[in-house]
Image (cartoon, rainbow, N blue to C red):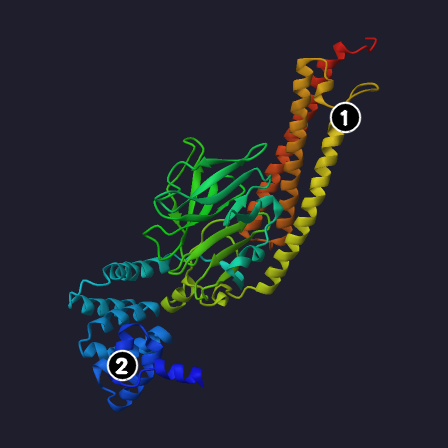
Amino acid sequence: MIGLAFSIGLSAQTLQEARAMFREGNYQQSMPVFEKELKRKPKDASLNYWYGVCVYRLEDKQKAVSYLNIAEKGRIKEASYLLAEAAFERRAFKTCLRHIDQYLLYNTGQHQNEIARLIKLCDQFPKMTQQIEDVLILDSVIVHRDKMLEAIKLHPACGELSAWKGKTAYLNEKGERCYTSDSVAGRGFDIFLYNKMPDNWERAQLDGQLNSAYNEAYPYLLSDGITIYFASDAPGGLGGYDLYISRYNTVSETYFKPTALPFPFNSTANDYAYIVDDVIGRAYLVSDRRQAADSLIVYTFVPNDQRRIVQDKDDDVLLRMAEIISIADTWNGVNVDSIKALKEEHYQTALENYHQEEEQEEAIENASATLLIYDDIFYASPADCRSKEGKAYYEQYLKFCQLRQQLQNTIDNNRRLYSEVEDGNEQKIKIGKRIMQAEWNMLSLEEQIQICLQHLRQAEIPYLNTGL
């Protein structure tokens, strides 16, 4: 009873009390009075505005439009601005601009930054929807913000995503290089590289145009060691954090100016991470579009080797695809369940092979470290060599063995991919060419290994008691 009396005390009893609460932002308490008065005076512009704002803030912007339209006709200034926001939310760009024009006639001087952004987005959206990347989205899952990393399954050869000082970080396969974001005095967060030293991690500045005066975070480096994806809230994006790509210039040792990713990877919400597993051919997009404050949505998709633009879709479908209203819009008759199962099977197989390859590499290292030099004379390491030339050839031989294993892994992975792609597919032709090139490289490498071994023995035999 005390609680009930308290809640009644907080609710407005008269229109004057409701208006006072409304001005303080207490829409929940003032709304019932406006609703009651509106039933008596349904055409009253002020009542429609007050009630419409309550609906707008508490329930649904689009549900408030009919009330705000009456308020706008009654020349209530703020109604025009709210109608512009609601129109943009449903991507009615011409209607949004019309309400903005109406609001600007009042010359209030308010919402200048927001209006400038709406005008820019109304211009950008129609252009960007003509450049949507045609990407197959396999699945989506909603997770708590703290559980984001659990929804992303990377092959170990691609490195690892983990938490680093409270931030998401990327570590390369060997665990010796870490990309993450750190605070910088006066400019938010920048992306830094940490190199692992014997007893600590040494921070290095990433030169070039990668970082801005705003916040950069969620870095992910492709296995080529050159291409980096990250998120930034710098001006010029669609809103919140947007996703960008940059590449490392090996000549100048700096990063090129980042480029924003197209639809559907960016949106007016916060888009945090773009992660590609190029071993499996599976990628992830992390965003908070249409999610609760503590939730994220993680999309799984098939990354394209080359960018493809969506073709032959009407404007309504393009808008849906731009913002991923439904992942089914991206399927185009493809059997998604079979692709998901195939990718997961490929992941599990590749994971098993990876661990087997680690064991094989260790065995190869042990085997290759023991070399027959002459008759029953064996060397176990370069330190056994009697000559400088022999030691150099032994070290070169070990490097060749490591390259041979890497090349064999590449051939095996491409053969698996080749078997999974349908005949006649352009991608299958490309994979076939890669396999042929890798096999030629393997033949050349085997010749170099034999030549290296011959030079090693020739360099060492004069130092041995062989009886020759």
In the rendered image, which residue does mark 1 sit on?
370
Percent of width and height locating residue 346: 64, 53
Classify residue 318 by image quadrant: bottom left
In the rendered image, which residue does mark 2 sit on?
17
**Which residue is at a point 56% across and 41% down the rendered structure image?**
172
**Which residue is at a point 30% across and 60% down the rendered structure image?**
121
- Mark 2: which secondary structure? helix
Percent of width and height locating residue 228: 47, 44
| Residue 364, placed above or below residue 306 | above
Position of 257 with respect to 445 (left or right) is left
Position of 69 with respect to 312 (left or right) is left
Asked whether 203 or 467 is in front, the reply is: 203
Percent of width and height locating residue 10: 35, 80
Point out the residue furthest to the front here: 2
Picture quarter with the N terminus: bottom left
Point out the residue furthest to the top here: 468
Return the mark for residue 381: none
Could you give the CA–CA distance between mark 2 and mark 1, rounded to whole angstroms? 91 Å
> Within 10 Å of the Cα at label 1, are there few (<14), some (14-19), or many (20+) other Cα atoms?
some
Using the rendered image of the protein, determine whether residue 60 is visible from the camera's viewpoint: no
Asked whether 60 or 163 is in front, the reply is: 163
Comparing marks 2 and 1, which lies closer to the viewer?
Answer: 2
Using the rendered image of the protein, determine whether residue 429 is visible from the camera's viewpoint: yes
In contact (CB < 8 Å): disc 2 and disc 1: no
**Which residue is at a point 75% across and 10% down the rendered structure image?**
463
Amino acid type, callout 2: Glu
> Within 10 Å of the Cα at label 2, are there few (<14), some (14-19), or many (20+) other Cα atoms?
some
Asked whether 165 or 436 is in front, the reply is: 165
